[in-house]
Every structure is written in structure tokens, then in C-alpha cells.
Image: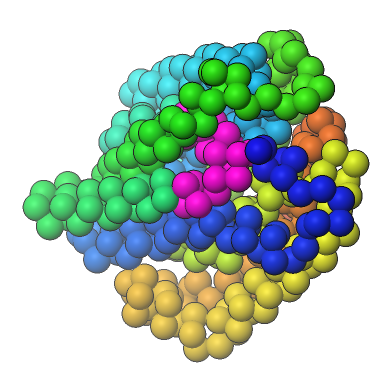
Amino acid sequence: MNSALQFSEGELNFKKIFRFWTPLSATWLMMSVEGPFLSAIIARMISPEYNLAAYGVAFAFAMIIEAPVILLMSASTALVQNLNSFKKLRNFTYALNTTVTGIIIFFIIPRIFYFIVISLIGLPKEVAELTHTAVICLIPWPGAIGYRRFYQGILIRNNLTRRVAYGTIVRITAMTASALLLHFFTSLPGAVVGASALSAGVVSEAIASRIMAINILKKIKDEIIVTPNADELSYKEIFKFYYPLALTSLITLGVQPMVTFFMGQSRMALESLAVLPVINSFVFIFRSVGLSYQEVGIALMGKNKEGYTLLRNFAFILGISAVFLLGAIAFSPLSRIWFYNISGLSLQLTNFASIPLMIMVLMPGLSVLLSFQTAILVGSHNTKPITTSTIIEFSGILIVMFIAIKFFSVVGVTAAT
């Protein structure tokens, strides 16, 4: 039975929400370990500041190119109801994956790439060259992400959230093994090691997600899984539903290159570029509980929003808990232990990262709130307001960065956070 239809009115409770959410949360939590792990390896290799900066910039560019496919999981959770909708959304996914892969290949053409990162962003030549090689290693990244998120959405809709977590275990294992092998047995720069490990992980997870969805796909193709009263989905309807989501992701992830651009013009630019990916990776661990809640809301809200009150209350508890845990670390000596002893930052960079981490302390709670609100809109097939709110967010970040750096000469990473 489809997870979206699993609970009738009055049957949903905190225990069922928790059991449905836990594997998805574990998935995001495991993914959140990627950044700190790879940053810790890069920080212990040759020229850590240059390589951490290059890895952060390469990852930011890969993320914005990936943006159009990132919400395919929400789309397949909401839309794949029968054989027709499966085929239509699968073809849509393949077209989208081909497009984003073509974009990243176009982006790495040397004349185009170096014009953007040196002439526009102002990266030092050493960082720009490392970034170029790292982005080349990330060519498989966007297509693999789109492919696995499409099949993960189908697993979530059919109440197989544990399989999503299993796929992430495959990803983390492949990423860790690749990073360690490249670190110990090659002389590749740290930024290249990090990017190569990321690509190996997502490609492995994409393959695993497809394999774990085989039984569900067989039922869909044999038309065993049929949603009563499901409308026949058209490509026009898919586009109308999805383009605000893709635009939202594009705007959201466009924040990273924009922040990189401003930090490149700021005071203490190299130090800022080096520590921001480490800070973001750490905060992402706590944000992951909220990011995982979006698909929970889409799947369990109910056709008439009968699950709203319970899901809202669960989200409130989740957000408060995540903010409290991050605050307990950010405002105590534990942050020094994380950045210096675990992440491998120098003492100077560790001290440099402490105030920006304190500024980010509310982010986990806001991530839960955003995920819950987005789930309500996606579940209602009303995706345009999501884009509007994201434009407001993007504008706010742009204004704060510009004023802080251009008029008050605030340190780059402090302005960014």
C-alpha cells in the first residue's frame, strides 16, 4: 500500500511518525558526515588551506548545477501513483539528468571556467587550478543525484524508508573507501581526493537505489500498485508542478557561489573560504533532521490534511531539540574540540570559526520549519509560493553580504554566516 495512503484519519500518532521519519533522518545524518570526514582528510594533507578552499568552491558549483534535480525525490513521492505517472516522471528525470550533466561539462571548458573563478570571483590562481580539477571529478555527481532521488521517492511513497537508509550506507562506504585509498596510495591533491570520493559515493548509491526498487517497479509495471482516483499525469502537468521546485533549488543553491564571490572580495578571504565548508558541514549534521522531514510531511499529511496537527507538533519538538544540541556545542569548548581535534583545523582557523558557528545556531530549527511548510505546499500541488519565498531569502542574503563586506569590511565568513 502507498505510504501516502497508509494511515487513515485518527490512526497517525507520534510513534508512527517517528518510525517513518527515523530511516530518512538517518539517511541525511549519514550524508552530513561526508563533509566533516572529507574536510578532516583534506586538512591533514599538503597545502590544507588552498585545498579546503578549492574543495569548498568546487562543491558549491557542483551543488548549483545539481539544483534542478535535487527535488525529484519530493516529486516522485508526490506524483508516482501508477504506471503512467511512473513512466512520465522517469522520462522527465532522464531528460533533466542529461541537461545538468551537459551543463557541468560546458562549465569546465578552461576559458569559461577560469573567466568565472579568476576574473569574476577573484580566486587565487593556485586555488582556481585545484578547483578546476575537482569539478572535473564531479562530472557524474548531478546525474547520479537525480537518478537516485527519483527512485528514493518511489521507495518513500511505498513505505520503504529503511531502503533509502541502506542506500546511503552504500554511499558512505564507497565514499570512505575511495577517500582513504586515494589519500594513502596516491599523491593527488586534497581537493581532488574529496571530489573523487563524493562522485564514487553518489554513483554507488544511485545503483543501489535502483536495485532496491526492483520489486516496487515490477508491481507498478504489472499494475498491481494502483492509486484509486489517480489522474492521468501529463508532461505539461509535471512541468507545471516541478519547475517552481527546480527554480527554488536553483536559487537556494545559487547562494553558495554568490557567497563565494563576496568572500573572495572580503577581508581574510582565504581563511574564510577554508573554514566555511567545515562550518557548513558541521551545521548540516544538525540541519539534517529537518531536511529529512519534508518527505515525511508529503507522505503522511493525508489528502485532507488530517495529519497536520501531529506532524506540526512533532516538527516543533524536532526543531527545538536540534537548536539546543547545536547551541550546547557552539557556545562551549566542545566547538574547539570539533574543529581542532576532529576536523584537523589549525589553531588559528579553529579560533576563526567559533563566532560564525555561534551565528548559525538557529539554522537547524529553521530547516525543520521550512521543510514542514514546503511539505504542505508540495502535498497540495501548490509549488509557486515556494519559489517566491526563496527569492526573498536569496535577496536577503545578497543584501546582508553586500552591506557587511562593502560598507563595514566584515570578515568574509562572518558576513556569510
Q: Residue at x 63, y 27 (%)?
A: 225
In the visual, does 156 lie left or right of 205?
A: right
Q: Quadrant of residue 243?
A: top right
Q: Residue furthest bottom?
A: 333
Q: Is residue 152 magenta?
A: yes
Q: Residue at x 66, y 63 (%)?
A: 18
In the visual, does 228 lie left or right of 340?
A: right
In the visual, does 20 lie left or right of 106?
A: right
Q: What percent of the width, then of the height, locates residue 361?
A: 65, 71
Instruction: Please name whichever residue, 312 or 261, is drawn nearer the observer in this view of the structure.
Output: 312
Instruction: Please name whichever residue, 390 or 71, is drawn nearer the observer in this view of the structure.
Output: 71
In the visual, does 41 lie left or right of 309?
A: left
Q: What percent of the width, then of the height, locates residue 291?
A: 63, 53
Q: What percent of the width, then of the height, locates residue 286?
A: 58, 66
Q: Quadrant of residue 143?
A: top left
Is any part of residue 264 visible from this angle? no
- Height in image: 234 above or below 7? above
Q: Residue at x 78, y 25 (%)?
A: 228
Prevailing secondary structure of the magenta residues: helix
- Height in image: 365 above or below 332? above
Instruction: Please name whichever residue, 23 or 400, is drawn nearer the observer in this view of the structure.
Output: 23
Q: Residue furthest left?
A: 185
- Height in image: 307 above or below 334? above
Q: Is residue 47 magenta?
A: no
- Height in image: 401 above or below 214? below
Q: What percent of the width, then of the height, locates residue 204?
A: 33, 39
* Coloration of the structure image: rainbow
Highlighted range, magenta: 146-165
Number of marks:
0
Is any part of residue 230 visible from this angle? yes
Image quarter in which the N terminus is found: top right
Image quarter in which the C terminus is found: bottom right
